[in-house]
Image: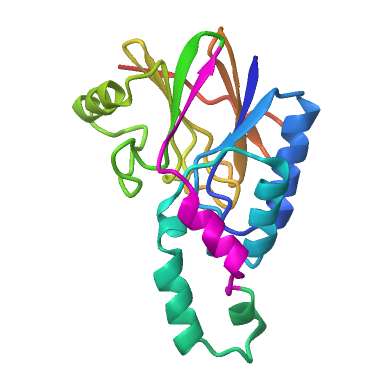
Amino acid sequence: MKIGLISDIHADLRLLRRALGLLEEHRVDLIVCAGDLIDRGPDGDAVIQVFQDRGIPCVQGNHDAAVLNKQDRLRRKADFSQPEMQSQILNQNSIDYLLKLPQTQRFSWDNLDALLAHGTPADYGEYVFSNTPNDRFRAIAQEAESDILILGHTHEPMCVRVGGVWVLNPGSIWYNRFGVKHTCAILQLPTYEFDVFDILTGYPIGLPMIEI
């Protein structure tokens, strides 16, 4: 089974389409998203419409959760003579969709349990980098109560095996802080083969697996 993993779209429709096209070329069976569909880019409504049309499972990221406060602030203070400000305003359908996203979702793939979250299972605002202390990784892996934990939020691709739990992050479609700038990933089961791809070139980037 092939699972396509995406995260941190940040309202970039062009790069989202490229990522989805790449994953479809590899004939994935399912695509899931670890959150943060909006902010930064200009295409929030269009990105959300793609998710609704395609029924892509997604969890709520920290930017998604802050949508009401952000939208209220923009409507009160933004200079709408500026096109970039106009593009930040979301329609009501988009706002409703974001507010209904769960903070976690569970799946069963090839008799393996998977948990999808944004930051950690308990906190969509917590950053889990590849150099996060081992004790924290062990606590998060135990908290997940699953064979696979898929995270986003950091914009850093990551593959960490914590005992019997695989903690994975596909990086960010919008912009990565480390190495290749725009990435998505494919997880093959039951072998746990995990490949991160450069969205712009279509090539895998050779991400090392870290074992704890």
**Horizontal arrangement in the rendering, residue 17 relative to residue 150 (left or right):** right
Tally the numbered discs: 0
Residue 97 lies in the magenta-colored region: yes
Q: Residue furthest left?
A: 135
Residue 64 location (% of width, % of height): 47, 57
User: Where, quadrant-wise, is the C terminus in this rendering?
Assistant: top left
User: Against 145, is 130 above or below?
Assistant: below
Q: Is residue 38 visible?
A: no
**Horizontal arrangement in the rendering, residue 103 relative to residue 208 (left or right):** left
User: Against 182, is 132 above or below?
Assistant: above
Residue 169 location (% of width, % of height): 47, 33
Determine the residue positioned at 70% across, 60% down.
46
Residue 98 lies in the magenta-colored region: yes
Determine the residue positioned at 47% across, 49% down.
177
Between residue 99 and residue 208, name the one nearer to us. 99
User: What range is drawn magenta here?
Assistant: 88-109
Task: Classify residue 102 by image quadrant.
Answer: top left
Between residue 100 and residue 123, name the one nearer to us. 100
Residue 157 location (% of width, % of height): 49, 35
Q: Is residue 36 visible?
A: yes
Determine the residue positioned at 26% across, 21% down.
142
User: Where, quadrant-wise, is the N terminus in this rendering?
Assistant: top right
Residue 93 location (% of width, % of height): 61, 63
The image's colour scheme reads rainbow
Determine the residue positioned at 60% across, 46% down.
173
